[in-house]
Image (tube, rainbow, N blue to C red):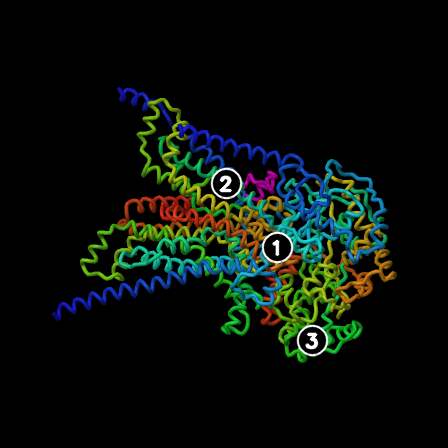
Amino acid sequence: MASAAQSRIKSISYAKYGYMFIAPFFLVYCFFQIWPLIYTFILSFKGNQANYTQFVGLDNYSQILFGTGSSVGAAGVHEEFARALGNTFVLWFGNFIPQILLSLLLAVWFTDAKVKLPGKGFFKIVMYMPNIITAASVAALYVNLFGDSKYYFVNATLMKLGMISDPVQFVAGPTASKIMVMFIQTWLWFGNTMIMLMSGIMGISPSLFEAADIDGANSTQQFFKITLPLLQPIMVYTLVTSMIGGLQMFDLPYLYHNGANFSKQLETVAVYIYYNFNKGTVEQANYGYAGAASIIIFAITAVLGSITFYMNRDKDAIAKKKQRKKAEKQMKAKMKQGGLSI
Amino acid sequence: MSKLTRTLALLASIAVVSTAFAACGQKTESTPTPATNNTSSQAAPEEGGNEEGGNEEGGNEESGNEEGGNEESGNEEGGEGGSTTLEAGAVNLPDTDDTLTVVCWTDADLQNMFDVYKDYSSANVVYQNCGDNGSAASTQYATYLNSGDDVDLFVAEAGWILNYINDDSMSAPLSDLGITADDYKDAYQYTVEIGTDNNGVLKAASWQAAAGGYAYNTTLAEQYLGVTSADDMQAKIADWDKFAATAEELKTASDGAVTMTATIGGLWQAFSTAKNAAWVKDGAIQTDVAKEFTDMVKGYVDNGYVNPNVEQWTTDWTNVGLQGETLGYFYSTWCLGEGAQLEQNGGTDGNWNIVIGPQEFFWGGSWLCVSPNCNTASEASKFVKAFTTDASIMEAYALYSGDFTNNKVAMDKIVADGSNSNPLLGGQDQFAVLSDVAAGIKMSDSITKYDQGLKDTFLDTLKKNISSDTDTIISTFTTQALADNPDLTA
Amino acid sequence: MSTKSQYGEVKDDYHKKIMAKSIAILVVCIILTLICLVPIYILIVNSTHSSNDLAQNPSRFFFGSHLGDNLKTLMNNLPADAGKAAKRVAAQYSSAFSLGKGYLNSLIIAGFSTLLTVFFSAMTAYGLTVYEFKLNSAAYTFIIAVMMIPVQVSSAGFVRFMYSLHLINSFIPLIVPAIAAPAVIFFMVSYMKSSFPLEIVEAARIDGCGEFYTFVQIAIPMMKPAIAVQAIFAFVSNWNNYYTQNMILKNDKYATVPIMVSSVLAFDKNIDNGVNYLCITLSIIPIVVVYFILSKFIIAGVALGGVKE
């Protein structure tokens, strides 16, 4: 009797409900994301400052990418964008490498049944903590602790201990400030990455480790032969999310400075974009440069994403089924994205 | 059962969300409610449920208490000023709101105005902050002014005011408040010229003539230079060569512990404005003054006359003064009043003096501009007139705040009466020292709309590359400046 | 006997090794814990000192006695005989860093955004998993594709668009877009695919439940774990979202906690270091406290695949 009802239900088309359920997402997404993206695209073909209404074709792109174009300062525009892009990658790389190494080490330690570590839960909680603190507050905290003169905590303490004789320029120094931002970024994220990797390691079947133990593999061998290969999907996921996060790096580089203006030596692409469109009246702002830089970043994101997933596609075969599925979906996403931007 | 409750709760929360949106929507369309103040000039009863109003109430009363017991505004001014009646001009803008909203970046700096104005008017004046410093304000005002939030008047700085007065969607003519150039016969003319837009329309009026001077620590001057009077000090730093020679003397005497002045930024202010050269001429960036300055300041840094790592307007800037690590600062008049930078950086011992310094210079200054969305026209008119045309109010304000006001009559009277003595300067009258400087300001020839950005970029480049040679610094600066301003040429 | 002792030695050796390793790990963990906590501790310590004390000796490790004074300055609640300089400082800090107002604004934005994010993401995920329709897989692919687009790439257009709609200084551009959260949808779809039996929907239909009713009544309670995890992350990321808030909110009265902190950082006049530290402390401590209360849950959530901001 149920089957009759079931077949009756099956004969009803529920497709319209599907559309109804996903409609809000698409409406809002188109209104607040797609249209602004298209608008940004349009802006990238328009002029800057007083010429903001003028259509200039690919001029902004050629200025940003090649330093040639209608503006006398085109070379400088290119230089600044290249520097911003360089900073973005340097800052990202400089926080991703220590972060992933540290997180991996901690994740392996924390999941190692042989290691007796008291307070494991406490350590995890504390190490994740920086991640939930507002980045603006973190920047303010570090600027105030690591200020450039002897009137700030870290320099004063180091001088008191006799470790330095002159204050270190942690905020204004071109290299020191970059290292600080990398450090803070690592400080913010290593706990998060560690926990994600831990869940990945715990997802690996314990029988693999047991078998390796019986075969006499030591823990280093186990790490390189079992843990690392099997962790690959989740590592790729971490890499990609971190990379995309890195391309958007804004709060810290923008706020980590002394005085009224942000630090040029920490200018990332996100800061470059914001700086150029947020310059006051429409005749002061450079919407064209901001738009073109945005579209370039969009393209870079898409390309990087696809490359990463292409490279890791085949090796995924040994990964857990669930993780593989996840990665494949993301790969599709990247391909699709790549297709969109071209 | 519990499922049903949860569903209801969920639906209720959605309802709340949608009501919130509805409310938000209304907000942007309707006239903003008056009671949104940070510092309201009255402890007026405010609309219920306005949390920030409630918070600040205590603060307002605090400042209210202050008005009587001020040593500077003193006895003579209070009563006399109170009798002045404010009259609005023939306004051409709506008068539908009763809260005068003045957009600025630090209401704390305008506290003096607000204190003085209370003696003359019971209007509800609200200072609304936008941006946290002058540079930030220059980039954020545009967005704020277009947001539909209440704004009647706004304060703009010399460095970027031209962007706003030359944009009719941002500013309205002062004649809409019934104020014309004729009202400024007693004003320092450069303020009027700067307040006039490209079409010759008067759009902004300043309450101050921002003459500057060199304030020095008399204790240190006596200790290391043997200088005991302001005139002697002035003689020792009468031009840049003497300034450098004195710096050398100071360095030797103090064994390098005391710098001649706190920051490169301050030096730039004194050096550049005195040259009266525009940053931009015929669309091209001018770097002559910058070059000259770079040459000079590189020498200063090499010789330890100034510490390049101390940044203006930071804690370090304050501390080098308080801890006796610098002999002096280049200040504008608005730094000299009670509670302002002179006190913050120098303490209240009165061991500071002000002199003209190596060159007569001036520093910034702020203008009052009218928003086209002004809906409190009469009150706005009264306010602008009070602080930019009314000699007696401006005199009271000058005495109260230590600020050099934009009214020759008022300032001459103060100097002639000898009614001002600044305890922070050991009783010196800064107005007497600076009145000639103020009379000589010709800023209107040299001001451009790019000033703030170019100055920031230049000083930033200079400090970051102080060890490079001058040509490198200038070309680095030019490259960056052109990248920031595609409108310009080299 | 010799073999036995040898065996014992090996065993001892093994135990020693493990012990040594454990201790080494413990030391590293303690160092990392200190690196995480010391900045916060110093921050709190410094907020209890006056600006003057900090200028004279910035290297302070123990609590001072000026917390009350700093608080009074921040609340603009100075004694009547305070100097003009102190009053200036107080006026400036209290208007830029008004705690109650900032927290309320942040709560409104983060709270409503979170509600919208989890509800509409669950709804979209439900629509994609439960119903078969022509554009189903296309829609899902689209959602995954846009998941990784950084917000910055559309921000220039976003601001100009909001500008033209007069939605600057409004919470709408900060709340309504939360309806569209591709990453959350992706997570919820994975969750539903692994632990939401579609038979339940059919059973509900047989019982005559409407589609929306089924979703709200049956699906949402079953998705509670996923919703809770995503709600926490959505809340945290909206609370911390300085970038968008800073673009849209240009008026002090709408300032959120991150904006207030950046204001304090941007002050160029009337700076008081003690109060500076207090402001930063007050912006951090409540979050940290809430975090420690919910920490077990949050950590479990991250392990479950919390999406990185």
Q: Which mark is residue B247?
A: 3
Instruction: Indicate whether C207 appears above or below B110.
Output: above
Left or right: B354 with respect to A58? right
Q: Which mark is residue B486?
A: 1
What crowding class fits label 2: few (fewer than 14 Cα within 10 Å), some (14-19), or many (20 or more)? many
Decide whether residue C167 is among the magenta residues. yes
Q: Which percent across, then down, holds residue B300?
A: 65, 73
Magenta residues? C158-173
Q: Amino acid at mark 3?
A: Ala
Q: Nearer the viewer, residue C204 or C289?
A: C289
Q: In the rendered image, which residue does mark 2 sit on?
A: C111
Decide whether residue C259 is among the magenta residues. no
Q: Which percent across, then down, holds residue C55?
A: 60, 65
Q: Nearer the viewer, mark 1 or mark 2?
A: 2
> What is the CA distance from the residue labelled 1 to the residue labelled 2?
42 Å
Left or right: B48 with respect to A272? right
Q: Amino acid at mark 1?
A: Pro
Q: Secondary structure at mark 3?
A: helix
Q: Which percent across, then down, holds residue C220?
A: 39, 34
Protein chain holding label 3: B
